[in-house]
Image (cartoon, rainbow, N blue to C red):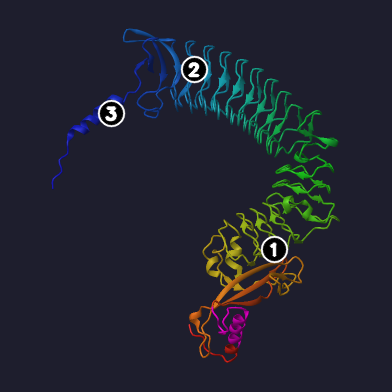
Amino acid sequence: MKKTLSLFPLMLMLCIASLSASAHDFEVDGIYYNIKSNTDLTVEVTYRGDYYYSYGGEYSGQVTIPETVAYNAKTYRVKSIGNYAFYECSGLTAVTIPNSVTSIGNWAFLRCSGLTAVTIPNSVTSIGEFAFSQCSGLTAVTIPNSVTSIGNYAFDGCSGLTAVTIPNSVTSIGSSAFFGCSSLTAVTIPNSVTSIGDYAFCYCSGLTAVTIPNSVTSIGNWAFLRCSGLTAVTIPNSVTSIGYQAFSYCSGLTAVTIPNSVTSIGLSAFSGCSGLTAIKVESGNMAYDSRNNCNAIIETATKTLIAGCKNTVIPNSVTSIGNYAFYECSGLTAVTIPNSVTSIGSGAFAGCSGLKLVSVPVTDYASFCENKAVGLIYSNIGKPVQLIDGDGTEIKEYVVPEGVTSIGSDAFRNCSGLTSVTIPNSVTSIGSGAFRGCSGLTAVTIPGSVTSIGSEAFSGCTSIMSVKSFIAEPFNVTGLFADETYRQGTLYVPIGTKDLYIRYDGWREFLKIEEVVAEPAPNGQCAKPTIIIAGKEMRYECETPGAEFESTLTTEEQRFTGNKLVMENKDLVYILTVYATAPGYDRSEPAQMKFAVSRNDVNQDGTIDVADIATILSAMTALARQQMDVEE
């Protein structure tokens, strides 16, 4: 069969391509324009071609944009600089924008790395998103009084920018507006600004001082993250919220004062501020306080210490140390945890590389556990912190208290001195990285009560060569053990479960898996229960304290031959089996009782009653003694 190719569609496509190859409306003196209105006679500056990436470097050197441009016997006013107009024109060194322009579009000068100077006139009211993003050669910019908003990422990545003037007309600084402006040394935010967006000055490592006016009510998430050169910041009384990691890793910051207007402080707002020596919450704040001049921020309602520094003294009234409260506080060398503390949050002391002594004035470590979850101590990767008892002795063998239900994430991370840990049957979950880097551990036993294990729970535990898991129904876990454990160690699992374990990540990687009988519980076996029938009631009893009972009821349909019991009568025998269980005990031996139910006059005395049941049971016993076969 022959196929005929029509040339018409192909010619039509070529015509369309030819028409669209020049998306700009016209070009004058090397500048490309799009007509915005033939009524108002306005145009915008644009890129050459169909798409912003159709041509590269169409603008270079110094470009002066005129206020008006003539085309087809008409004079148009240049009203705006369009989206992507000068996109990736790395050869562009300077641009002059006329007073007729009111807006600079999104991505207008994105990646113009050679641009060193730009004059923005008073006519411009808005600067779009990514407008000057990654213009690494730009050293200074003056934003005129006409501008009311600075778009997201407007000057993102302008690493050469050393100075910026923000006028009183600006009301908001967009997200990541000056992200990565590492050469920026100082910035004054005018009284007109009410909010500082997320990441607004993030990674401005050269920034040494910033003035936040009384008009600002919110400081966004990561707003000043990793401004390592920032040595001082004044938060005005107008601010009500400080975002997540707002000043995190401002290592040069030495002091901070939280005004009484603040009602919300995000997680890790000051984490990683290793130079911080003083923290104060002004009196009169209804949400937070720094009681007893403790050099910390305490959430008043919950009595939770949420941010500390190297000079923090934890007051005895604090009941909880929050997540990441001292995170990467490298100057912290010693800390005393008062006996009022009942919980320590995830990562509370992680990265405290200088921490040498943790004083815990009680021996019942379960008292530190929120909802009975272990969270004792954290350490910096590669620099383990010792686990210290109340008398100052390093803990090498640790027994997780009975009743603890979960071991939190990173709970024992990098405790390289820990050689043995006992996990009780009450534990149901082990968090991510719970024992990561515990290189002294040689063996671990995971009880059958555990139903959840976080990723890398035992990663970096390179000395573990014996893993006993009594989980009856295994599940996937990412990177559970170290490669050395998988290659050289042995995984012991309950009898009959090996085929299950090799199906799941975290377990299948073991080169050697053996089945074993579960280890006896610490208190032995539960006492065998007793089945008691009193009148019409039945109950179970067991001598083991706190015992609970498991029971099953099965039927046994039997046929008897050689006597007057004929199985067409459909007589049934019920077998009740009862086990006793208790925390810390293995399951008891079974207790059993048989019940018979008759639907017929078995002994042919004219009535169906208890005598018929007795006849059935008697016949069953006699037949069993004679070892007679039972007919199916």
Three-letter code, disc 1: Asn
Residue 418 pos. (x, y %) = 73, 60
Q: Which residue is mark 3?
A: 17
Q: Give the labeled residue for mark 1.
A: 425
**Of callouts 2 and 3, the N-terminal one:** 3
| Picture residue at 77% right of the left edge, 67% below the top | 545
Residue 618 location, quadrant: bottom right
Amino acid type at image mark 2:
Ser
Residue farthest left in this picture: 1
Reply above or below: 424 against 148: below
Q: Could you classify mark 3 by the number of other residues whose Cα lies within 10 Å: few (under 14), some (14-19), or many (20 or more)?
A: few
User: What amino acid does circle 3 point to?
Assistant: Ala
Nearest the viewer among 569 and 35 is 569
Distance between the alpha carbons at the discs numbered 2 and 1? 67 Å
Secondary structure beneath dot 2 equals strand
Magenta-highlighted residues: 600-621
Determine which quarter of the picture holds residue 258.
top right
